Amino acid sequence: MNELPHRLDRTIVIEAPRDIVFEFFADEERWASWWGAGSRIDPRPGGAMLIRYPGGTEASGQVLEVKPPERIVFSYGYASGSPIGPGASRVSISLETIAGGTRLHLAHEFADERARDEHVQGWRYQLSLFANAVTDRLHANAEGAINRWFQTWADPDSDSRGRALSAIALPAVTYRDRFSCITGREELSAHIGAAQRFMPGLRLSQTGGLRHCQGMILVEWNAIDQDKGVKGTGITVFVLNADRLIVSATGFR
C-alpha cells in the first residue's frame, strides 16, 4: 500500500458490551446490517471485505489485522476507482471497554487530502447506523422488561414487586412524572403500592409497539379503571443501559 499521510479520526461511545459491538465486524449478517444487503467480510488476515451500499456503489478491500474483540484493520476503496481505488486506503477500528459501554475509535488513512475530506460526513453517518444496529441487537428483547414494568404497577404484593424490579431495573432507578420524583427500587415499589391504595382498580395497559433508539424506548399506554374503562392515556420514556436494565423511566400525560 502506498504512503497514506492524510488521516480522518472519529470516536463514538456505544452503550453496549464490547463483545457484542465486535460481532458487527466478525459476522457477515451483522456486517451487512449497517452497510447494506450483500456486503461481506471474512474476518481473518487476508480475508476479503466487500461493501454494497444501498444505492449500488461498491467498495472492497482486504482484512489486514484482526484481534477480537479489540481491533480490526482493513483496506478500503471503490470498484469505480473514484475517489480512491479498491483497497487504496486503510481503516483501523479499535474498541475500548468503558463504564457504561464501549468507546469506538476509527482512523481512516488516505493518500489524498481531498479524498479524506469527502469521507468525513460519510463516516459520521455510517457510524450512526452502526450504533443503531448494535443497540437494536442488544435490546431486541426489551419488550419483556417493559411488559414486566407495567405488570408491576398492578402487583399488590410488595415482595413480588421488589423481585420484579430487581430483575429489570438498576438499584438507583429513577422514575419521574407529574406526580413522582422517585429514586431507588425500594422507594419505587413503595410508590407503586401507594398508587394502588389511592387509585384502587386502576392499571396501566401498553398500547402499540415499542419505539426504540440506542437504548431509549418510548411506550404509549392507557390508564384503565376496572369499572369505568379508559381514564387517561400517556407515554413513558425508558432509558436502558448496556446490561439491558432500566436506568430511568419518565412518564408524560
Image (cartoon, grey):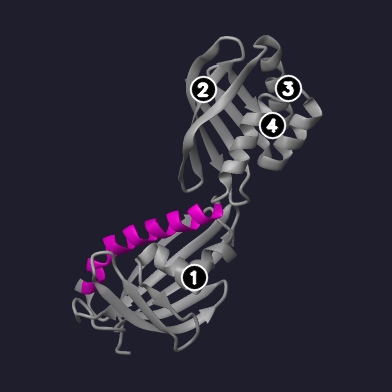
Q: Of callouts 3 and 2, which one flags the residue occurring earlier in the amino acid sequence? A: 3
Which region of the structure is painted magenta? 115-138
Q: Of callouts 1 and 4, which one flags the residue occurring earlier in the amino acid sequence? A: 1
- Answer whether residue 132 is magenta in the image: yes
Which label is found at residue 184? 4
Q: Of callouts 3 and 4, which one flags the residue occurring earlier in the amino acid sequence? A: 4
**Magenta stretch: dominant secondary structure:** helix
> Left of 139 or right of it: where is 157?
right
Amino acid, disc 1: Ser
Q: Of callouts 2 and 1, which one flags the residue occurring earlier in the amino acid sequence? A: 1
Mark pair 4, 2: CA separation: 25 Å
* Residue 239 found in image quarter: top right
The x, y position of residue 83, in whole percent, is: 19, 76
Circles 2 and 1 in contact, beta carbons < 8 Å: no
The x, y position of residue 25, in whole percent, is: 47, 71
* Residue 60 found in image quarter: bottom left
Q: Residues within 10 Å of mark 1 (few under 14, many from 20)?
A: many
> Compared with residue 178, is residue 57 higher up or lower down, i.e. above or below?
below
> Compared with residue 159, is residue 168 higher up or lower down, i.e. above or below?
below
> Left of 37 or right of it: where is 169?
right
Circles 1 and 3 in contact, beta carbons < 8 Å: no
The residue beneath circle 1 is 94
The residue beneath circle 2 is 222
> Compared with residue 119, is residue 150 higher up or lower down, i.e. above or below?
above
The residue beneath circle 3 is 190
Amino acid, disc 3: Ala
Amino acid, disc 4: Gly
